[in-house]
Image (cartoon, grey):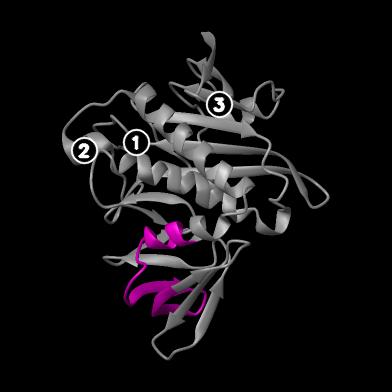
Amino acid sequence: MLLFGSIMKENSPFELELIRLKETDSTNNYIKHLPLTKEMVIVSTEFQTAGRGQQGNSWESAQGANLLLSILFSPPENVLANNQFILSQAISLAIQKTLDEYTNSICIKWPNDIYWNNKKIGGILIENELHGKKIERCIIGIGLNINQEVFKSPAPNPVSLFLITGKKYNRDEILMKIIHHFKSYIELIKEGYTKAIVQSYHKVLYRNKGLHAYKDENGIFYASIDHVEPHGAICMKDESGNMRYYNFKEVKVIIDNLELPN
């Protein structure tokens, strides 16, 4: 089943195309073959047979319960390959801001997992198509646990909005709020206000205060988050005052003796 729709934001020329699928292997795989007919193209599905997260991590989702989608768009010209992490911060903030309307304690676990307290409610996978230093097209895959009641996979800490609040939610309403907020952050990027986005990202970053347990190739250590680099690397200050820099997948969060990969 395939439905097409066009949605225009109130009082704005912003336009998007929305494609709904009953089932697909991956919305990221599907959308990468589509032309960019509007400012944004969105593909959502009721079920993914090969849902994935960062660097091949699997993603469990009950059919018809959650938000599974991909966004295709052309980033602002001032976003180049070496500062593309601002796009990750923008979509993470858009999701955090939206879910924060329904419950408390929604935060962003670096680089772009969405957390409620110590549990994962959502994940993001970004794939950029580059032409030299310029990002021609950006594909953002999103999985958000909205109405799922039971998780059967061995994932260590999943949670859904339903399990947090005991209520079921209109997924389309949540989707449109995310897109509205994301568009607002993209406009800020176009106008050069990236510093405000970076500050907002750090403010809602998981474990943004105090010393916490982490693990790298040398073992467990305790550190506080200092900042995140424009290209996405995280900078931590350990107990000895040393600065430690990590790229994606180079450090793990330790929660109750569980190792949670980034």
Q: Residues within 10 Å of mark 2 (few under 14, many from 20)?
A: some
Cβ–Cβ under 8 Å for marks 2 and 3: no
Q: Residue at x 68, y 43 (%)?
A: 76
Q: Residue at x 59, y 44 (%)?
A: 126
Q: Which residues are magenta?
A: 199-225
The extreme left residue here reads 166
Mark 1 lies on residue: 145
Q: Amino acid at mark 2?
A: Leu
Res 215 seen here: yes
Mark 3 lies on residue: 25
The extreme front residue here reads 11
- On the image, the x and y values in percent for residue 99 come to 32, 40
Q: Residues within 10 Å of mark 3 (few under 14, many from 20)?
A: some
Cβ–Cβ under 8 Å for marks 3 and 1: no
Judging from the image, what secondary structure is the residue with disc 1 in? loop
**Quadrant of the rendered image containing residue 38:** top right
Magenta region includes residue 218: yes
Magenta region includes residue 157: no
Q: Amino acid at mark 1?
A: Asn
Q: Residue at x 61, y 63 (%)?
A: 230
- On the image, the x and y values in percent for residue 105 come to 26, 52
**Quadrant of the rendered image containing residue 187:** top right
Mark 2 lies on residue: 163
